[in-house]
Image (cartoon, rainbow, N blue to C red):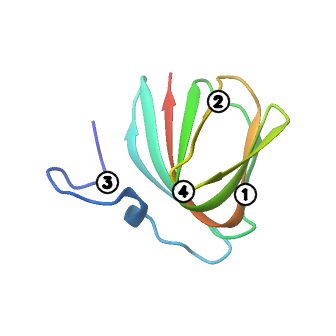
């Protein structure tokens, strides 16, 4: 089920992706019909434009600060904070500063 990650090893999820200037970087850990789990890093000012997901999406900020716009409502999340973005509701993600997040989508 898990890929791109060592098993039976303690780790910090935020260390699985590095920052790259002017980019959003991702590392998929799980992808199947039931769930998708990805770790992202965003350089300051980088974004994923408005889109909708076919499942409920839970984001947890691992480091830094990100702006999440969900159904027109804006949320600023910092390290340790989590937000659920409901299925089929348009949302976008923006790097208020460099930040990393874990995204889990349940279908």
Where in the figure is residue 57, as x and y percent of width and height? 57, 32
* Quadrant hosting residue 9: bottom left
Disc marking residue 4: 3
- Residue 53 visible: yes
Circle 2 is placed at which residue position? 53
For the residues labelled 4 and 3, the Cα–Cα distance comes to 23 Å
For the residues labelled 1 and 4, the Cα–Cα distance comes to 18 Å
Circle 4 is placed at which residue position? 79
Where in the figure is residue 12, as x and y percent of width and height? 33, 60
Instruction: Specify which label sits upstream in the sequence, 4 or 3.
Output: 3
Secondary structure of residue under mark 1? strand
Instruction: Specify which label sits upstream in the sequence, 2 or 3.
Output: 3
Residue at 31% over, 54% down: 4
Relative side of 3 to 46, left or right? left
For the residues labelled 2 and 4, the Cα–Cα distance comes to 23 Å
Secondary structure of residue under mark 2? loop
Disc marking residue 47: 1
Where in the figure is residue 92, as x and y percent of width and height? 74, 44
Badge 4: few (under 14), some or many (20 or more) residues near its Cα, within 10 Å? some
Instruction: Specify which label sits upstream in the sequence, 2 or 4.
Output: 2
Secondary structure of residue under mark 3? loop
């Amino acid at each position: 089920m898990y890929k791109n990650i060592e098993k039976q090893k303690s780790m910090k999820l935020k260390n699985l992706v590095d920052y790259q200037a002017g980019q959003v970087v991702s590392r998929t850990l799980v992808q199947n019909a039931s769930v998708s789990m990805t770790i992202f890093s965003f350089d300051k000012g980088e974004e994923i434009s408005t889109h909708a997901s076919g499942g409920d999406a839970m984001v947890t900020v691992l480091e830094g600060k990100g702006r999440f716009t969900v159904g027109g409502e804006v949320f600023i999340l910092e390290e340790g904070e989590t937000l659920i973005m409901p299925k089929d509701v348009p949302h976008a993600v923006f790097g208020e500063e460099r930040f990393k997040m874990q995204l889990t989508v349940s279908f």
